[in-house]
Amino acid sequence: MELWEILDENGNKTGVIKARNSQLNEGEYHLVVQVWIMNSDGEFLVSRRDAKKAWPLMWECTGGSAEVGEDSLAAALKEVREELGVELDPKNGEMYLSGLKRSHFIDAGMMLLDVWIFRQDVDLADVVLQEGETCYAAYMVQEQILKMIDEGSFIGFEFYPYLSDLFAYTKSPKFQDK
């Protein structure tokens, strides 16, 4: 059973622990991470959701909820390992965005979203998809992702409101010179 540490609006632990799918009350938050993996060719490793999941067969970046005892980085590494079978090197990661407040979608609670960018070359032959979670993985350039969002086959800006800024950042000298 997945357990979440309930946070306040500033990301501080409240001492409350709830099981996944438990009702979150107003003022309760849990940590969610989204992970964008970019290779040296500027392509992003994305996956397709399993047909039995919500938003079936939609493309997305890797992501999920932090569990009890996990910080943001640990949650990001875990989600990629679980969904893609890939071990990311923590020193290849950079937190792009931290603490974005988002509706929990199913109740009065909220999530605090942390967005990570990892620069790491991952061979698609090394990807091991998690049954029930992911059914395909591919590399895509930003133009493909934006086109698929427009066509409705990639989860859209309601989940990635920062995406245009993230893409611009990955092309900036600040990011490129790291």
Image (cartoon, helix red, strand yellow):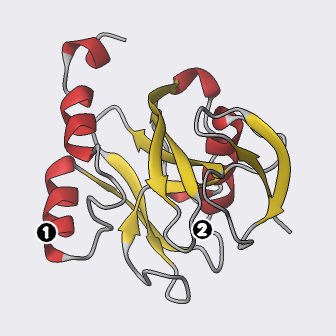
- Residue at x 26%, y 29% (from the top left corner): 170
Q: Is residue 41 left or right of residue 37?
A: left
Quarter where residue 140 is shown? bottom left
Residue at the farthest bottom position: 52
Q: In this picture, is 96 found above or below 134?
A: above
| Residue 54, image x, y percentages | 50, 82
The quarter of the picture where the N terminus appears is bottom right
Q: Amino acid at mark 2?
A: Leu
Q: Amino acid at mark 1?
A: Asp
**Mark 2, other Cα within 10 Å: few <14 / some 14–19 / many ≥20:** many
In the structure shown, which secondary structural element does the residue marked by tag 2 occupy?
A: loop
The quarter of the picture where the C terminus appears is top left
Q: In this picture, is 42 found above or below 6?
A: above
Q: First in sequence: mark 2 or mark 1?
A: 2
Q: Which residue matches tag 1?
A: 150
Q: CA distance from mark 2 to mark 1?
A: 26 Å
Quarter where residue 164 is shown? top left
**Mark 1, other Cα within 10 Å: few <14 / some 14–19 / many ≥20:** few
Q: Is residue 28 left or right of residue 175?
A: right
- Residue at x 27%, y 64% (from the top left corner): 156
Q: Which residue matches tag 2?
A: 129
| Residue 119, image x, y percentages | 43, 30
Q: Is residue 159 left or right of residue 129?
A: left
- Residue at x 52%, y 58% (from the top left corner): 125
Q: In this picture, is 95 found above or below 161?
A: above
In the structure shown, which secondary structural element does the residue marked by tag 1 occupy?
A: helix
- Foreground of the two, 86 or 20: 20
- Foreground of the two, 58 or 26: 26
